[in-house]
Image (cartoon, rainbow, N blue to C red):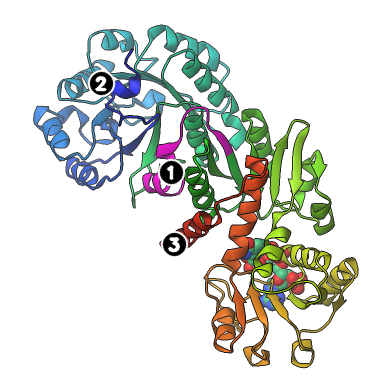
Amino acid sequence: MTTATERLGAPAGSSCQICVSLAAAEKTDLQRGLAAVTDADLIEVRLDALAEPLACDDNFFAALHGRSPAPVGFTCRPQWEGGSFRGTEGERRQVLEMAARGGAAFIDVEQDAEWAESFIGGTSVPVILSHHWLSPRPADLGERAQRMQAVGPAIAKLVAPAATPADAIPLLAAGAELVASGQPATAFCIGSAGTSSRVLAVAQGAALIYAAQPHSESVAEGQWPVETLREQLLLQRWRSGFDCCALAGHPIDHSLSPAIFNAAFDALDQPMGYLPVAHSEIEPVLELATAIGLRGLSVTMPFKQVVLQHCAELDPLAVAIGAVNTLVADPGGWRGCNTDAAAVASALRDVCEISGSRVAILGAGGAARAAAFALSAQGAAITLCNRTRARADDLAQQVGGQSAPIEILTSDPYDIIINATPIGMSGWNEEPHTPFPVEWLRGDEVVFDFVYRPRETTLLRLAAQRGCTIVEGLEMFVRQAAEQYRLWVGGDSAAPLDIMRRAAEKALRRR
Ligand code: NAP
């Protein structure tokens, strides 16, 4: 039996095709947009967006196909289903029949079009039978999915908006059910809260994912840029049945984690994928993660503290630090861990002896707490210097260290100095650009800057010039990810640290 993706000309071995959506009011703009598309398996042209869709003739379609870097399919969405086409149903069918005759790779027809089934019966072009709801969690989802399956289109497409990521749960379940029954399908949510569902659907066997053309606005809110799908998510390697892990945080648009984890899974041929799930509240993200069986989550700002209350079990170190950056799906619920602490110790162990060393930590926030607990447990003597002295006092007491004003660096010698404040990060416009005057350095210290954007901070650059050994924040970032990898993949699985480091460096350079 030929699969829908084969009928649509899918590259050999791929499970899901990336379909770039294009819409323009003017034909010339559409043609320009089409010619600029890169890395798409398919292109969908929204004929209803044209100012004069009824004026599309054979020459128009021939010109489009002639310029296109990928097979082109067509939609002419009516107003009654969220589109822009204003003509009659007869006219709409006529436009789509012309498109089909003109060499379309597929035609998308709404399930509610009275002529949908006769259109399917009368054409050899693969038809995507679709339904687009206008409000989340539609009550008739199951019934519609069944009716679609009875028709047996090339692809059944079910789309609803999402107010939270959890609204995608029924859509993803319906899509997975269709696929399991042998009906090629794609079911996902639109809107910014539905972004993650588009990719999760791929791990459940979706035949298509709609994407935005590079450097242009997406046609539907929540579409991923095609280059992000290919370069960071490596979506071309995702297969039905992949286990997924995700990043929960807000905002996380520029996170390095998707590039790092997908590169690691790819390098070790793990049938796993990693995606960001951005939302302003953690609860719907956890609801989605539990419902679809995510294997784990990275947790970042602003959820590192609040997530503790959602854990069935907590690693003692995470309790002491008061922050969780990793969730592992255990049979009894989420296990909360903190891999920042292990990352700090591991990065430092590569360059110096921790036991017996004198460590000054600048800051008393989450990252400073992870460092203080990790290094005091390894036998270091800790001094906390923080803008708000009371927080430093408190943390010093918890780790058996001392707190002091930052000027202590001028009088007392330290083996290791850690910047756990945001001073020096990209966009830091305040004076000073280093957390202390670098003239205070003697030159024999290890200077570790947790800031990793930019990779080489002013502090690190000047410390290196003074002869100090430097440790980059990127090293901590990569190592905390490597520890997450071990927790999720299980057993003694060692993460491919070099691969992850290179992926992080590449992602940082790209930005
Ligand atoms: P946080 O919990 O918000 O703590 C920030 C700390 O910096 C607080 O102690 C704060 O002092 C201090 N601070 C903020 N602005 C300051 C200023 N202008 N002058 C002096 N001190 C200032 O943040 P965090 O999560 O600990 O993160 C701290 C830094 O580490 C960030 O740059 C973050 O990107 C980086 N980090 C890196 C990694 C990695 O993997 N490389 C991991 C985690 C964090 P007050 O107590 O007085 O507010």
Where residue 175 appears, as percent x and y from the top left, is 50, 22
Q: Residue furthest left?
A: 59
Vertical order, 298 against 453 (above or below): above
The residue depicted at 60 percent of the width and 77 percent of the height is 470
User: Of marks 3 and 2, which one's residue comes earlier in the chain?
Assistant: 2
Report crowding for label 2: few under 14, some 14 to 19, many 20 or more residues within 10 A (C-alpha).
many
Q: Earlier in the sequence, mark 1 or mark 3?
A: 1
Residue at 56 percent of width and 85 percent of height: 462
The answer to which of 74 and 476 lies nearer the viewer is: 476
Tell me the magenta residue range: 226-244
Is-magenta flag for residue 240? Answer: yes
Tell me the CA gap for discs 3 and 2.
43 Å
Viewer can see residue 219: no
Note whether 310 is above or below 143 in the view shown.
below
For residue 238: magenta? Answer: yes
Q: Nearer the viewer, mark 1 or mark 3?
A: 1
User: What label does residue 92 carry, if any?
Assistant: 2
- Marks 2 and 1, how far apart at CA: 37 Å
